[in-house]
Amino acid sequence: MTPQDDPSLNRRKLRLALRDAREGAKLTQRDAATALEWSPSKLIRVETGTVGVSVTDLRALLKLYQVRDPRKVTELEAAARGSKGASWWSSFHDVLNPQFAKYLGYETAATSLRTYHPIVVPGHLHTHQYATALLEARGLEGKRLERLVELRMLRQERMFNGRSRPPARFVLDEAALRRQVGGREVMRGQLDALEAFGARDDVSIRVLPFESGAHYSTLGSFVLLTFEEDDDLLYLEHAAGSMTGGEDMDLLGRYQECFETLMDRSLDENDSLNLIRRIKEDLGVS
């Protein structure tokens, strides 16, 4: 399955088109649901991209919204047919919570990614050994541990070696680079991987040094996803995970500003790579 074939991308295309069409028809979600004799929750799930939509339901919506352009109708019908089925992460349902599964759908559709982590290396950049050591420290073991590491590696493969390869900017706190997750050998391998990622044209790795001081996000990590024709999405990484987009523009704006502040306070890419190399030398592992 290519990124373009993923049901989550088709659901997103439908979400944007149907929301815009409803607003163009000057109908609220409740108005539309009532007119179609649907429950409001059904329309909400369609407009948030949580579920796919059948071609029959799509045609009913387009008729209500007076969308008559044959090319547009054909395009959306194709998206409706492609909105069903399993996403690439669906086979990991046994180890994924619903909120993170939903986030992965957005991440798959993003045109760029920005993220900061103050404690450890972001999951997008993990080596197999680093991911294993980190999850073991959280009390995971056995099959569940193996599955989560496998998911992390597959996600990385799709993001950096897939067809879309959206540009990604990472700000890593110096503390995350010096924390010896899994010991010196594992950490050396992780730092080698960061060097390799940092050499790519589609990846920017910046290090926030200790002397940069306090800032808005000293207490937690976050991800900002950018999309075509849609608001940015903010994902706050914690036990349950939480997302916000256009529904809380104030919070989204604060984190967008925070990321730019982090970029301003970080070392540039060359100095960041030099610091990574110095930290490797400090490990004393050949």
Image (cartoon, rainbow, N blue to C red):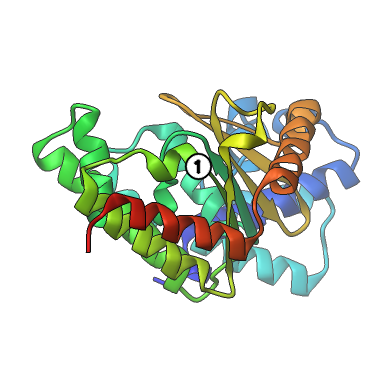
Residue 222 to residue 186: above or below = above
Q: Residue at x 63, y 29 (%)?
A: 217
Q: Position of residue 228 (x, y in %)?
A: 74, 59
Q: Is residue 113 left or right of residue 230?
A: left
Q: Residue at x 69, y 26 (%)?
A: 216
The residue wearing badge 1 is 174
Q: Quadrant of residue 244?
A: top right
Q: Position of residue 170 (x, y in %)?
A: 57, 52
Quadrant in which the C terminus appears: bottom left
Q: Nearer the viewer, residue 260 or 265?
A: 265
Q: Kindly tell me whether residue 182 is visible in this rendering.
A: yes
Tag 1 secondary structure? helix
Residue 1 to residue 30: above or below = below
Q: Kindly tell me whether residue 84 is visible in this rendering.
A: no
Q: Quadrant of residue 202?
A: bottom right
- For badge 1, the amino acid type reads Glu
Q: Is residue 70 left or right of residue 101?
A: right
Residue 104 to residue 77: above or below = above
Q: Nearer the viewer, residue 60 or 103?
A: 103
Q: Quadrant of residue 134?
A: top left
Which residue extends farthest left?
142
Q: Nearer the viewer, residue 250 or 18?
A: 250
Q: Residue at x 27, y 47 (%)?
A: 131
